[in-house]
C-alpha cells in the first residue's frame, strides 16, 4: 500500500460496545412491557428499530469496504476468518429482518403474545451477535489495523452512517459516548463536518439521557456488561 497511514480502529470497539449494551437489554425491555400498553410498545419498538438499523448499516459498510480488502491483502490461511465474518453477517441480517417483521406486528397488536415473538427473535439474535462482535474484535480488528488505510477506514465509516436518519445523529452519538473512552469519542467527533461538531457536543448526552428515561425509566441505564477493551 502506498498510503502508510493505517486505520485507527479504536472506534470499532466503541460501536461494538453500544451494540452489545443496547441489544443485550432488549429482550428484558420487551418482556417488561405490559400487555396492551400501546404507548410503551411504540417507545420500545422505535428504540429497537433505531439500534437494529445502525447494526444493518454498520455490517453493510464492512461487507462493502473491509472484507474484500482483507481477502485481497491477507495471507491465504487467514481468509477463512474473513469468510466466517461474512457468514455471520448473513445469519445476523436474516434474524434482523425477522426482528423487523415481529416489531411491526407488535406495534399493531400491542399484545403480550406479539411481544413474546419479538423477544424470541432477540433470544436467538443476541447470542449470535455477541459471539460475532467479540470474535471480530479478537481476530479481525488487529488485522484491519495492519492492512487498511486511514482513508479507506474513513470511507467505510462514511458509508456506514450515510443511510441513517440525520435527526437521529445526536442520539446515536449520545449512545456512543455513554460507554466510550472520552479520547476515542472526541477523535470520532472531530471527523464529522465542522458544522455538526458543536451540535454533537451540546446535544448528544442530553439526547441519550432523555431517550433512556423513556425507554429504561432512568437517564442512566446499566453500562455495557463487558470490560473496556480499548
Image (cartoon, rainbow, N blue to C red):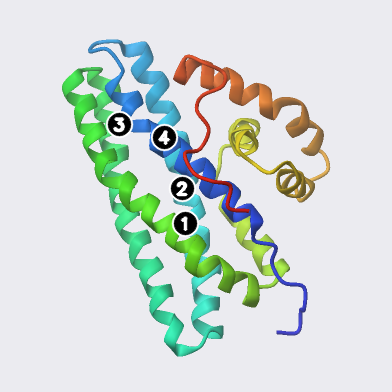
Q: CB of mark 1 within 8 Å of CB of mark 2?
A: yes
> Residue 49, labelled with which disc?
4
Q: Secondary structure at mark 1?
A: helix
Which residue shows up at 60% across the image and 37% down it? 179
Answer above or below: position of 77 versus 11.
below
Q: CA distance from mark 1 to mark 2?
A: 6 Å
For the residue pair 26 and 162, the one nearer the viewer reads as 26
Do tag 4 and tag 3 residues touch (Cβ < 8 Å)?
A: yes
Q: CA distance from mark 1 to mark 4?
A: 15 Å
Where residue 218 appears, as percent x and y from the top left, is 52, 16
Residue drawn 82% across and 38% down?
195
> Between marks 4 and 3, how big is the CA–CA gap?
8 Å
Q: Nearer the viewer, mark 2 or mark 3?
A: 2
* Residue that label 1 marks: 59
Whether residues under marks 2 and 4 lie with C-beta atoms below 8 angstroms apart, the answer is no
Residue ID for mark 3: 103
Q: Quadrant of residue 90?
A: bottom left
Q: Residues within 10 Å of mark 4 (few under 14, many from 20)?
A: some
Amino acid at each position: 500500500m502506498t498510503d502508510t497511514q493505517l486505520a485507527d480502529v479504536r472506534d470499532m470497539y466503541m460501536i461494538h460496545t453500544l451494540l452489545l449494551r443496547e441489544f443485550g437489554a432488549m429482550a428484558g425491555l420487551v418482556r417488561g412491557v405490559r400487555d396492551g400498553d400501546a404507548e410503551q410498545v411504540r417507545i420500545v419498538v422505535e428504540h429497537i428499530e433505531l439500534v437494529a438499523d445502525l447494526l444493518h448499516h454498520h455490517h453493510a459498510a464492512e461487507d462493502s469496504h473491509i472484507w474484500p480488502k482483507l481477502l485481497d491483502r491477507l495471507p491465504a490461511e487467514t481468509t477463512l476468518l474473513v469468510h466466517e465474518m461474512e457468514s455471520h453477517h448473513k445469519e445476523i441480517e436474516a434474524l434482523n429482518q425477522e426482528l423487523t417483521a415481529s416489531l411491526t406486528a407488535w406495534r399493531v397488536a400491542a399484545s403480550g403474545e406479539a411481544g413474546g415473538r419479538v423477544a424470541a427473535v432477540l433470544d436467538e439474535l443476541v447470542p449470535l451477535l455477541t459471539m460475532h462482535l467479540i470474535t471480530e474484535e479478537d481476530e479481525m480488528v488487529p488485522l484491519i489495523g495492519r492492512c487498511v488505510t486511514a482513508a479507506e477506514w474513513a470511507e467505510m465509516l462514511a458509508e456506514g452512517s450515510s443511510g441513517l436518519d440525520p435527526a437521529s445523529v445526536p442520539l446515536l452519538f449520545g449512545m456512543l459516548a455513554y460507554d466510550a473512552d472520552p479520547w476515542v469519542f472526541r477523535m470520532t467527533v472531530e471527523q464529522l463536518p465542522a458544522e455538526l461538531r458543536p451540535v454533537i457536543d451540546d446535544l448528544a448526552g442530553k439526547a441519550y439521557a432523555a431517550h433512556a428515561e423513556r425507554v429504561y425509566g432512568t437517564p442512566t441505564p446499566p453500562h455495557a456488561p463487558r470490560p473496556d477493551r480499548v
